[in-house]
Image (tube, rainbow, N blue to C red):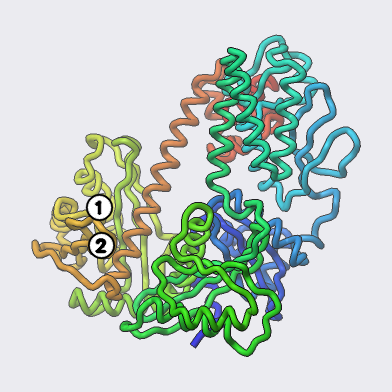
Amino acid sequence: MFLDDFTFDLESFLKNVSTHPGVYRMYDKQGNIIYVGKAKNLNKRINSYFSKGAKDLKTQSLVAQIHYIDITVTPSEYEAYLLESSLIKKHKPKYNILFKDDKSYPYLALSHHDFPRLYGFRGKPDKKATYFGPYVSLASMRETLVLLQKIFPVRQCEDSYYKARTRPCLQYQIKRCSAPCVNKISKETYAEQVDLLKRFIQGKLSSVLEEVSNKMHQAAEQHDFEKAAMLRDQLTILTKIQQQQIIDQVSLRSFHVIGIASIMQKACVSLLEISQGKVEYDRHWFIDIDMLQEKEDVISAFLLHYYLSDQSRNLWPEQVILPEGSKVSSSLLSAIEKKAGAKLQWLIKTTGINAKWQKLAMVNAKQKLQSNLQSLSQYAAKFTALQTWLNIEEIRRIECFDISHHQGEATVASCVVYEKQGPVKSAYRRYNIEGVTAGDDYTAISQALHRRLSSGVQADNLPDVIVIDGGKGQLHKAEQALLQFDLQNTIQLVSLGKGVERISGKEVIYRGFDSTGYHLPAYDLAFLLLRQIRDSAHDFAITGQRKKVAKRQTESILEQIPGIGAKRRKALLTHFGGWQGLTSASASEIAKVSGISAKMADMIWHALH
């Protein structure tokens, strides 16, 4: 009934892997972990290994040996980093350690000055600084550095820049430096911040929180309200980080967390084994279930399979966190405890940290099940189901449109494309919508469809079905567009309205030139396909809209820097190939742009960070 592995479909996995932060493990044919990595976006990071771009020999060799990839979703990137570090130390994958020597690892360094400088370092550590690391990648080190700069106002500038200052730089103004260069902070207070920073890097968050809180109250009692306000802001950020944390919680207990997700006649059970607050193992099983089976039946069957099998077990958990709402017979739990030779604590109704673990196991089960269901054969079955429901002979290509905007501005329309093999991401498109009233989704969808149909008629690459995210209003605009191009008998229109309850799985489906609102069962294959495509379009639209807003904000930042006019802005963008390249460049790299002095480059770098 329960299977520990399954045939791995790499192509399907790459298309459907989660966009959450998390850790990925790559295995060879023998089942050995050959690489462990972490990602802010698992989908983008894992897919980058298999893109067509030039790769170094190490990556080429790694990719050639990959036989299977597994992931663990984490609540935030911070937990992903901690879990990655733990797994590398435990498994020592060869591609994490053999292709780097001590000179190539990135570190965080804290200089030994009276007012120490925090900076990234790559090379062989010496006695001129205290080093923290090594970090697995340069990106990990840089991300940690940016986080630390936001929390602790310790200087990052080089000595030559530091000694030449006569007034605070932009870093002081944005509260990322306490300006020791112009005596804005005492040596003692600065040393306190450095000590907090050291302890934070070492993972002693609880003690840092306690000390910052105490110092804040002391400052307030002494009527040093400026210092109290600074510590209050620092405490707010640190508290937020603590609330997001799960994996590095200081704990001596050992426990298991079980999550379950089911769709139609397929279910996935996910098991996290936790030791001292860290994930030691992440396992999952796919099972076929009858529609009449209840969730507790699946959980009971799993407990029987995993804990009461003939396999000998030397280590038992102190606690087992079961899925929310589970109902398991006391006799089964007693039998497990008898085999364990100890009383186990079974948790179902959870709060606090246990509730976060419970949710994480559920997220992992859901992600693994979705990846399994979204295989090539599943897409073919879904397409067939939609063909039957729409009563058309064949569907080769489906396109879905969605509109996203930020407070009525930066409106973007997305178009995602699906074929029987799954999403065709190379054909995804975004349309910048201009000249419409803020928040007017009707006119925006009309503009996007006119542009798509116009180019499609010329190139003869029209879809068989167009899906609209919206109700009758959006559908009516789409109908007008089809009529204008005389395509009403060529393309089938479908829209997904939110319905009265506005609950996913209970959307109202409308068909083009048909005012009837249709409802399909939540797990109908045709309905699942429509919802999946709609969700992809929504995510793609939001991503595009956020990039557009970020670009405008970056443009605004550059325009505020004295001496940076249109000509220099153009030179910067041309040199780095866009905003992303510019924001990731160092001050010395920016200084290489024609017309940009070293001083101006430093101003630009500080403004963008």
What residue is at 73 percent from the left and 26 percent from the top? 192
Residue at coordinates 34% horizontally, 77% vertically from top-left?
Answer: 264
Q: Quadrant of residue 307?
A: bottom right
* Residue at the spot of label 1: 449
Amino acid, disc 1:
Leu
Identified at 61% across, 60% down, the residue is 23
Residue 103 vertical position relative to residue 598 in the rendered view, above or below:
below
- For mark 1, give the secondary structure: helix
Residue nearest the viewer, comparing 392 with 65 = 65
Give the vertical position of 203 relative to 525 (above or below). Answer: above
Vertical placement of residue 380 versus 94, above or below = below
Q: Which residue is mark 2?
A: 466
Q: Most extreme residue toward the top, as rendered?
A: 166
Which corner quadrant of the image does residue 533 belong to? bottom left
The quarter of the rendered structure image containing the C terminus is top right
Tell whether 70 sits left or right of 365: right
Residue with the most extreme right position: 127
Mark 2 Cα shell of 10 Å, populated few (<14), some (14-19), many (≥20)? many
Q: Is residue 17 visible?
A: no
Q: Earlier in the sequence, mark 1 or mark 2?
A: 1
Q: Nearer the viewer, residue 75 or 446?
A: 75
Taking the image as shown, residue 135 lies to the left or right of residue 170, namely right
Q: Is residue 407 visible?
A: yes
148, above or below 495, in the image? above
Label 1 environment density (alpha carbons within 10 Å; few <14, some 14–19, many ≥20)? many
C-alpha span from label 1 to label 2: 10 Å
Cβ atoms under marks 1 and 2 closer than 8 Å: yes
Residue at the outermost bottom position: 310
Q: Position of residue 305 (x, y in %)?
A: 54, 85
Residue 501, image x, y percentages: 20, 57
Judged from the image, the secondary structure of the residue bearing numbered disc 2 is strand
Q: Which mark is residue 172?
A: none
